[in-house]
Image (tube, rainbow, N blue to C red):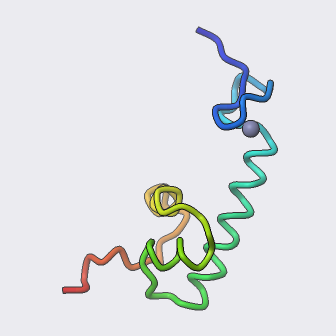
Amino acid sequence: MMTDACLKCGSPMNPKELICSVCGQNDREEYQLIRNYVRSYPNSNAMQIANATGVSVSKILRFIRDGSLTVVDQDTHRR
Ligand SMILES: [Zn+2]
C-alpha cells in the first residue's frame, strides 16, 4: 500500500520519505538541542537530557541508537 502522508503529522509529502520536511526540521532542531546539551554535560543520561531539553526520552534513545549521539552515558558503566 502506497502512503504519501507524513507518519507524524499526516501532511501530504514525498512517498519516499517517512516524515515530511517540517517534521524533519523539528527533528533536526531537537537533535541540535540534545547535542549542545551533551557537549556541555558529556556524562548525562537520556533522562537528564530529556529533562533539560524537553525532548522525549524515547526520541533521545532513538538518536543514540541511530548513532547520531555517541557521547551519552546510558548507565552501562554506572554501577
Ligand atoms: Zn510531518
Q: Residue at x 66, y 80 (%)?
A: 36
Quarter of the figure with the N terminus: top right
Position of 67 with respect to 54 (left or right) is left
Q: Which quarter of the picture shows residue 56?
A: bottom right
Q: How many marks?
A: 0
Quarter of the figure with the C terminus: bottom left
Tell me residue 30's x, y (percent). Answer: 68, 64
Q: Residue at x 53, y 76 (%)?
A: 49
Tell me residue 61's x, y (percent). Answer: 45, 61
Q: Nearer the viewer, residue 70 or 32?
A: 32
In the rendered image of this protein, does residue 6 appear above or below residue 75?
above
Tell me residue 11's x, y (percent). Answer: 78, 29
Q: Nearer the viewer, residue 35 or 6?
A: 6
In the rendered image of this protein, does residue 62 appear above or below residue 23?
below
Tell me residue 31's x, y (percent). Answer: 65, 65
Q: Residue at x 78, y 52 (%)?
A: 25
Position of 2 with respect to 23 (left or right) is left
In the rendered image of this protein, does residue 27 appear above or below residue 31?
above
Ligand 1 quadrant? Answer: top right
In the rendered image of this protein, does residue 65 appear above or below residue 3?
below
Q: Residue at x 69, y 55 (%)?
A: 27
